[in-house]
Amino acid sequence: MLFLVLGRGKTGSLVADVAHERGHGVRVVGEEENRNAAALTGPFLAGFDAVIDFTTPESVVSNMRACLANGAHMVVGTTGWYQHLDDMRSLAARRGAGFLYGTGFSIGVQATLRVAKELAKAAPHYRFTITETHHTDKKDAPSGTALSLRQALQAANPSLQVEIVSKREGDVAGLHVIEAVSENDRIELKLEAFSRRGFADGAVRAAEWIVGKTGVWEFSTIASEL
């Protein structure tokens, strides 16, 4: 397959490396080459099996509009844009595109989401806090994974009020700590990413999965198929 990777940052570059390792051809386009999605024309996009976006919250909306309007198959790992999700769903449906987005393209994130739901059910009267720490280059806060963890907790126990604390330090790939506290004890659930490779591998597998498909999916709903 031939993939287009949008973004020359650390994660985007690693996505390209993983795609090469899995036997795919890759073209990488940086933001400096793609101001306001100017590079994403119909003829250009037609040459790729799928597009993978790891850019910034400021760039990703224009990229999604251009790709989906041309019926492309797109995987978006960028976060911080979800206020536009309904518009992107509608555009993908109108144009017959394939669109897959998510906040944590790793097995560890998906496993933590499942465990978080069970914790919320098992400790319904505890006070919950999520603390997330990422590298200083990360633009959005809270992280998409932290928001998904809060959503998972509240889906299992709608009465929960979950505070999120965001920190930006050094080159931290991703650290999420769920803390549940009562008068008697404290429970901690921690997910620490040692590198961005787990996210890159998941994104490439997601791109392989979406080729030839039409529709809209959130990564957690198809992760078990990869």
Image (cartoon, helix red, strand yellow):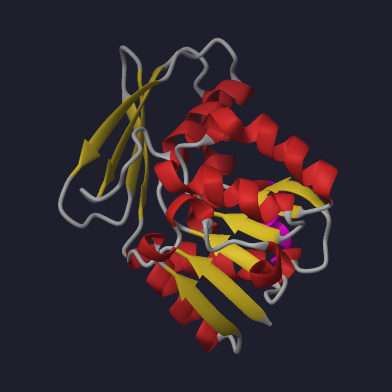
| Viewer-proximal residue among 192 and 195 | 195
Which residue is pictured at 31% across the width and 12% down the height?
Answer: 183
Main secondary-structure element of the magenta-colored stretch: helix
| Viewer-proximal residue among 150 and 19 | 19
User: Residue 132: which quarter of the image?
Assistant: top left
Give percent across and percent down for residue 177: 34, 38
Q: Which residues are magenta?
A: 221-226
**Quadrant of the snapshot with the N terminus:** bottom right
**Quadrant of the snapshot with the C terminus:** bottom right
User: Residue 9: which quarter of the image?
Assistant: bottom left
* In the image: residue 179, left or right of residue 59: left
* In the image: residue 220, left or right of residue 16: right
| Viewer-proximal residue among 157 and 51 | 51
Give percent across and percent down for residue 215: 81, 49
Q: Is residue 191 magenta?
A: no
User: Can see residue 219?
Assistant: no
